[in-house]
Image: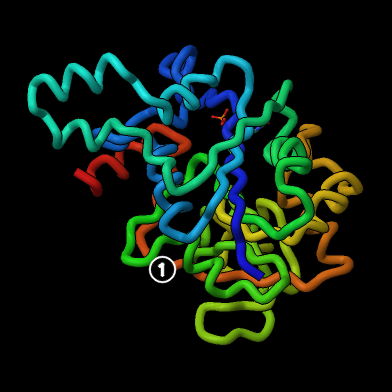
């Protein structure tokens, strides 16, 4: 079955970038000259996505503005004959429909995905968190979608041992090339307790049953409903797979990661 829709939860508070994110959404911070969110939208479109569902919070409407027409700017650039720049600022969503839903309170990334349930409408879908950018030949989302055979998929990469405390780590079972069966997911284990060096990054293909799993799931420490909580619940009924993504990943959710991405893309 084709994956037509992508959910982009971008309603978080971006506290690690304060004061930069007091007004500007973290997802609009640039990697050189293009906002992080635009890399993700382009990744989705290049992976065959036809509808992008943004989960935003109040005050993050600037994200919608970024993807809308800016008539004065377009007229100005046209009058100056700057067709190169005109191409860059024209809305890029001609090939995909954009939908916006709200998360009223930042109750976790899983809670944000739940807000998109109606817009998704009972079909499998892609989820891209607003942080993880992969530089490589094949878009990371396409690498995931190409492996989809009806059961949910997580993107993983090899994580240095001492960093397992920052990731959801998987216990892999049988594998074929870069596709692994997921036997267990452990949230932020200490290095000596990590079941492998494969850590989950912010890209997923979810079967629609994830919504019920999220509703039934126990919340993470701190009371947030995380998407991983939903996957742990979903695994009671369905097989889950992981794809080891090819390419260089940047976690742009913290200042050091964004700076590293800027250096790489410059
Ligand atoms: P993060 O934890 O990286 O984002 O969530 P954050 O909460 O904005 O970051 P900090 O820790 O305060 O700096 C991963 C993704 O999930 C979204 C975020 O916007 C980001 O894209 N998210 C997170 C939501 O949409 N809602 C939430 O309640 C939490």
Write down the residue under mark 1: 246
Up-down relation of residue 76 to residue 213 (above or below) = above
| Nearer to us in this view, 182 or 49 | 49
Q: Residues within 10 Å of mark 1 (few under 14, many from 20)?
A: some
Q: Position of residue 18 (x, y in %)?
A: 47, 18
Name the quarter showing ligand 1: top right
What residue is shown at x 42% (from left), y 53% (from top)?
43
| Nearer to us in this view, 81 or 85 | 81
What residue is shown at x 45% (from left), y 24% (from top)?
17
Q: Position of residue 194 (x, y in %)?
A: 65, 64
Is residue 61 among what the camera can see? yes
Disc 1 element = loop
| Left or right: residue 220 compared with residue 198 | right
| Left or right: residue 210 compared with residue 138 | right
Could you say which quadrant of the image residue 139 lies in?
Answer: bottom left
Q: Position of residue 237 (x, y in %)?
A: 88, 68
| Nearer to us in this view, 262 or 72 | 72
What residue is shown at x 43% (from left), y 41% (from top)?
93
| Left or right: residue 77 compared with residue 131 | left
Instruction: Name the image quarter holding the C terminus.
Output: top left
Whether disc 1's CB lies below 8 Å from ligand 1 is answered: no
Could you say which quadrant of the image residue 184 lies in?
Answer: bottom right
What residue is shown at x 31% (from left), y 37% (from top)?
31
Up-down relation of residue 251 to residue 239 (above or below) = above
User: Which residue lies most toward the left here?
Assistant: 81
């Amino acid at each position: 079955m084709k994956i037509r829709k992508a959910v982009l939860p971008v309603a978080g508070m971006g506290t690690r970038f304060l004061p930069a994110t007091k007004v500007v959404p973290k997802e609009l911070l640039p990697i050189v000259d293009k906002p992080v969110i635009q890399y993700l939208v382009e990744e989705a479109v290049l992976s065959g996505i036809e509808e992008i569902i943004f989960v935003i919070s109040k005050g993050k409407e600037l994200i919608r503005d970024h993807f809308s027409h800016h008539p004065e700017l377009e007229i100005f650039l046209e009058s100056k004959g700057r067709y190169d720049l005109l191409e860059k600022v024209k809305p890029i969503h001609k090939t995909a429909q954009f939908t916006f839903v709200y998360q009223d309170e930042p109750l976790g990334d899983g809670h944000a995905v739940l807000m998109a349930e109606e817009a998704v409408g009972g079909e499998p879908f892609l989820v891209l968190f607003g942080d993880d950018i992969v530089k490589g030949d094949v878009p990371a989302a396409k690498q995931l979608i190409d492996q989809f055979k009806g059961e949910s998929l997580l993107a993983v990469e090899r994580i240095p041992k001492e960093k397992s405390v920052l990731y959801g780590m998987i216990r892999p079972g049988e594998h074929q090339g870069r596709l692994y069966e997921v036997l267990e997911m452990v949230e932020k284990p200490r290095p000596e307790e990590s079941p492998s060096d494969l850590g989950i990054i912010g890209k997923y293909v979810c079967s629609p049953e994830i919504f019920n799993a999220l509703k039934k799931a126990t919340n993470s420490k701190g009371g947030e409903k995380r998407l991983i909580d939903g996957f742990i619940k979903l695994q009671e009924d369905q097989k889950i797979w992981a794809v080891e993504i090819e390419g260089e990943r940047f976690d742009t959710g913290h200042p050091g990661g964004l700076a590293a991405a800027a250096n790489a893309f410059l």
